[in-house]
Amino acid sequence: MKLAAIATMYGRHDKTLPLLEQIFESSRVPDELWIMCEGIDDADVAINSLKILGKESNGVVVLPTDLTALGQYAIIPYSHKINWVLNRTGADAIVYVDNGSMPSREKYQVMIEALENNPSWGAVYCSQTRSGIDSRTEWADRVVDNAYAVLNYTQVMHRKTDDRWTTNMAHANPDVADAMFWQSLHKSIGKFYPVDGERVHDWHHIPSHAAQGI
């Protein structure tokens, strides 16, 4: 299976280089890495990080997101960026990351092997430790029938489908865009299955409610 990782970068520049280094040192490096940046500064940091790692790439995309007359976002920025990639990738499986998260080195290998070895499974998820406004560890220890408001988007790997993320700003804060996407995935590909929660982990920082949906 071909794997695509979709990274949405917004601020937190000191986290970008360590995250990209971890991805490229994974036991299963994604076949496609889509780095979607909010602005020029974010893209510059990503480009410089790729140069430091010797991974210069044209895959860093600056995708401006429309603002209203009041200077607010007209659509959910990260949903817009994710959909842009989903419309273009040729991968069989999709995983998500941002520069507020950090995957374990075996994460992608174990997750994609689970999909490869279980053709009836449409999505898998790993354990996650969260910090910030939502500090807790969510263990991958059960089959999830309804992931709405349960799983974070960096926990999940799913097969490619025609489903797309909502860009409606009414669902941006609190952040329910990924929860709504999970519901559409459930209809398309069924339950979400856990992988080895001890070996496969993800760390994700949610600094504040204001940052959600961006």
Image (cartoon, rainbow, N blue to C red):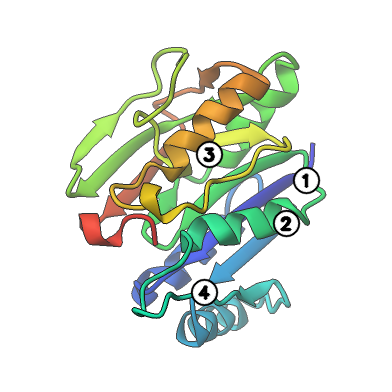
**Residue under circle 1?**
91
Q: Nearer the viewer, mark 4 or mark 3?
A: 4
Q: Secondary structure at mark 1?
A: loop
Give the quadrant of residue 149.
top left
If you read the primary sequence from the N terminus, does the residue marked by circle 1 or circle 4 appear first? 4
Q: Is residue 30 left or right of residue 8?
A: right
Asked whether disc 2 touches disc 3, contact meaning CB atoms under 8 Å apart, the reply is no
Give the quadrant of residue 148.
top left
**Residue under circle 2?**
32
If you read the primary sequence from the N terminus, does the residue marked by circle 2 or circle 3 appear first? 2
Query: Can I make out residue 205 in this image?
Result: yes
Q: Secondary structure at mark 2?
A: strand
**Residue under circle 3?**
107
Q: Is residue 33 left or right of residue 176?
A: right
Amino acid type at circle 2 is Glu
x, y percentage for residue 128? 35, 36
x, y percentage for residue 67? 45, 76
x, y percentage for residue 115? 68, 25
In three-dimensional space, the C-alpha distance between marks 4 and 2, rounded to whole angstroms, equals 26 Å
**Residue under circle 4?**
66
